[in-house]
Structure formats: C-alpha cells, structure tokens
C-alpha cells in the first residue's frame, strides 16, 4: 500500500472541501434573491405595474445583485428586440 496522495485523491478532496460548500452558498444566495426580489417584481410587472402595489425591495438588493453579477450567476438584462 502506497502512502502517497494521488492526483485523483487530491482533486476529490478539493472538490469535497472547496467547491461543494461554495456551490451551496451560491445556490442559497441565488434562491434568496429570486424569492425576495425577482419573483415579486415579476408578479408586479405581470399585473401591469400598478404604482400603489410597487414591491418594496430589501436593503441588501443592490449588494446581492452586484455579487451575483460578479460571480456570473446573474446574467445582464438585455431587452428583447421586436420581431
């Protein structure tokens, strides 16, 4: 039995201790942003944007938006072109 650490063991350890917790964190932050920001705004727009029912965005929305954009989990909004 050899006592050295093979490349496949090293990559498995890296995946287990570094990437999996990061993906869990990203999924939780993205889900929170979707539930508290994206979904209410989508419903408001679908209802015709009545000013009396404008959703109140959380104070952390700009920070989380910037974070998700920097990490690549939120794409840039591009308006649709008319056909």
Image: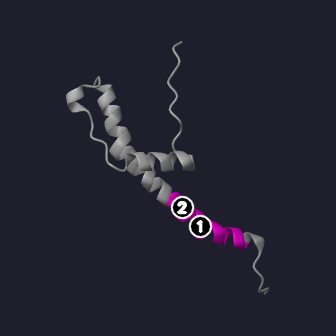
Q: Nearer the viewer, residue 62 or 33?
A: 62
Q: Residue furthest top?
A: 83
- For residue 18, which numbered disc appears in the image? 1
Q: Position of residue 62 (x, y in %)?
A: 41, 45
Q: How many marks?
A: 2
Q: Which residue is mark 2?
A: 22
| Residue 59 pos. (x, y %) | 32, 49
Up the image or down, 55 lies above or below 29; here it is: above
Q: Is residue 6 above or below residue 26?
A: below
Please give the name of the residue rendered at 54% of the width and 61% of the height, measured from the top-left corner. 22
Q: Main secondary structure of the magenta part?
A: helix
Does the magenta run of residues contain 67? Answer: no
Return the residue found at the far left: 52
Residue 82 at what x, y percent from top left?
51, 14
The reply, left or right, for residue 58 in relation to residue 23 is: left
> Is 81 above or below relative to 56?
above
Circles 2 and 1, Cβ within 8 Å, touching? The answer is: yes
The 10 Å Cα crowd at callout 1, few under 14, some 14 to 19, many 20 or more, is few
Residue 36 at x, y percent in the picture:
33, 46
Name the residue located 43 percent from the left edge and 50 percent from the top edge: 63
| Mark pair 2, 1: CA separation | 7 Å
């Amino acid at each position: 039995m050899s006592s050295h650490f093979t490349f496949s063991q090293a990559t498995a350890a890296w995946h287990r201790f570094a990437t999996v917790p990061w993906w869990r964190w990203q999924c939780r932050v993205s889900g929170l942003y979707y539930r508290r920001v994206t979904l209410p705004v989508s419903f408001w727009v679908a209802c015709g944007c009545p000013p009396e029912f404008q959703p109140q965005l959380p104070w952390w929305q700009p920070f989380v938006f910037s974070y998700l954009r920097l990490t690549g989990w939120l794409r840039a909004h591009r308006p649709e072109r008319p056909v």
